[in-house]
Image (tube, helix red, strand yellow):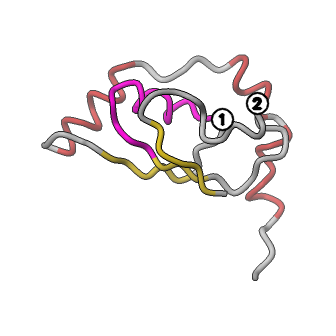
Amino acid sequence: MLAMPDRATSFGAVAADYERFRPGYPAAVADLVAAYAGRPIATALEIGAGTGKATRLFAARGITVTATDPGDRGRPGRGHFPPRGPGTLSGIR
């Protein structure tokens, strides 16, 4: 297997601060994605989920989200990926 470049996993060093200080996405983001899709969204694949801010936004709308992120070092709630909540299907590391 190829080694993961350091840059791909560097977010983990600041993930806790990011989760704590960066506001979540506004509901309008999910509305824009739904409008772009042009049909009801039942499932989504999220690449680069980070701390799960977008994952939680979509899962709260009943969308089953499969989330993936290259790193988990320093992630808030480590060991609880994907973020806990209704609608979240699975996490892939």
Identify whether 64 is placed above or below 1.
Answer: above
Q: Secondary structure at mark 2?
A: loop
Q: Say if mark 2 contacts mark 1, CB within 8 Å.
A: yes
Identify whether 85 is placed above or below 72.
Answer: above
Q: Indicate the position of residue 78 as horizontal and vertical percent values.
A: 78, 37
The segment highlighted magenta reads 52-65
Q: Amino acid at mark 1?
A: Thr
Dot 1: within a 10 Å radius of its alpha carbon, few (fewer than 14), some, or many (20 or more) residues?
Answer: many
Q: Indicate the position of residue 7 as horizontal and vertical percent values.
A: 78, 58
Q: Amino acid at mark 2?
A: Pro
> Among all residues in the image, which is located at the extreme left?
38
Magenta stretch contains residue 56: yes
Q: Indicate the position of residue 77 as horizontal and vertical percent values.
A: 75, 31
In which quadrant is the C terminus drawn? bottom right
Disc 2 designates what residue?
76
How far is mark 2 from mark 1, CA to CA? Answer: 7 Å
Q: Is residue 80 left or right of residue 84?
A: right
User: Which of disc 1 and disc 2 is earlier in sequence?
Assistant: 1
In which quadrant is the N terminus drawn? bottom right
Q: Secondary structure at mark 1?
A: loop
Disc 1 designates what residue?
51
Magenta stretch contains residue 58: yes
For the point 71% across and 17% down, the residue is: 21
